[in-house]
Amino acid sequence: MLKIILLWFISLLLPLIYSDCFANKWAMVTQPAQIGTMAQSIGTYNGGCLSGATALSPNGKGYQVMRLSRNRIYGHPDLKQFIEILGQTTATHKLGVLLIGDLGQPRGGPTLSGHRSHQTGLDVDIWFLLSKQAENRILSATERETWSASSVLTDHSDQINYRQWSLANEKVLEAAARMPEVDRIFVNPSVKRELCTRKTAHDWLRKIRPWWKHDDHFHVRLKCPVGSTQCIGQEPLPSGDGCDAGLAWWFSAEAKKPAIKKPIPDKTPELPALCNTVLKR
């Protein structure tokens, strides 16, 4: 019986070990690689890679990058440009400084921790904390590693904490959503609900999508870039502003009830064949 149990345990453990080893190959790469003459996002957001990545400068007008030790400052040139433009908008309107979290790895691909997506250079996490402290100085390496992204919810409830949430957060989200290259922006359901109650134009709210967690940052996802013929986008967004019964579901018992038996996910991604070339280049 003990032998049977041991074999069963190993059968569960091996896919995870293989998955981590596979992801580690991508995490160990420190420099981008390029196939062809232009950058290419390849595959899906959750199973792909990136050729011709460009690094985001740690400091720019209206933004500073956090957690530099993770070396996840790479993205498609479209993503770099998006962040730079959003930072300039934030600075121009004196909304504070954007604190940028993860983009992707030098060649994209799966990470060892933190994300299932961020694999094609088209995703970026941006903290809700708009730092006034960083407006007139460059954050130190220690500050970038030790500062925490603050939740905008009260004690992790469904209620917005107005000491952490402000009109500036809404303006940043609106500015991001109105940029044509943005496909969707993931936020906590309570943030989406807060935006829906505002008596402002709702035409940009369609791109704001509720998702679990995301109470201390928002996750921007760009559309497949022009010329990235092997990039696979998500399904089109539903029509409307999303302030309907679909949003109400996120606050239901069904949405909050954890699964009784949570299956072990298959963490081994199936990447397009071209990603093997990107990894080995």
Image (cartoon, grey):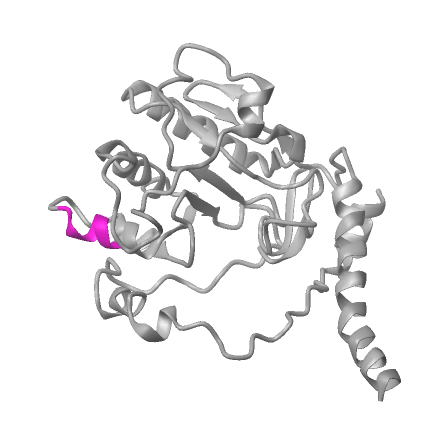
Q: In this view, does 72 lie above or below 84?
A: below
Q: In this view, does 256 lie above or below 166?
A: below
Q: Is residue 62 above or below residue 202?
A: above
Q: In this view, does 81 lie above or below 237?
A: above
Look at the image and tell me in which quarter the N terminus lies: bottom right
Res. 275 in view = yes
At a point 33% along the width and 65% down the height, the residue shown is 238
Question: Of residues 5 and 98, which is closer to you in this image?
Answer: 5
Dominant secondary structure, magenta:
helix
Q: Where is residue 122 in the image (x, y as percent from the top left)?
A: 54, 45
Look at the image and tell me in which quarter the C terminus lies: top right
Is residue 270 left or right of 57 when viewed as pictured? right
Is residue 80 left or right of 181 when viewed as pictured? right
Q: How many labels does the image show?
A: 0
Choose top left, top right, bottom left or bottom right for residue 135: top left
Res. 58 in view = no
Question: Of residues 135 and 75, which is closer to you in this image?
Answer: 135
Question: Of residues 133 and 200, which is closer to you in this image?
Answer: 133
At a point 32% along the width and 57% down the height, the residue shown is 189
Q: Position of residue 244 (x, y in %)?
A: 21, 66
Q: Position of residue 35 (x, y in %)?
A: 76, 42
Is residue 247 left or right of 266 when viewed as pictured? left
The verdict on residue 223 being magenta is no
Q: Which residue lies furthest to the top in this view?
A: 136
At a point 44% along the width and 18% down the height, the residue shown is 61
Numbered range of the magenta stretch: 193-198
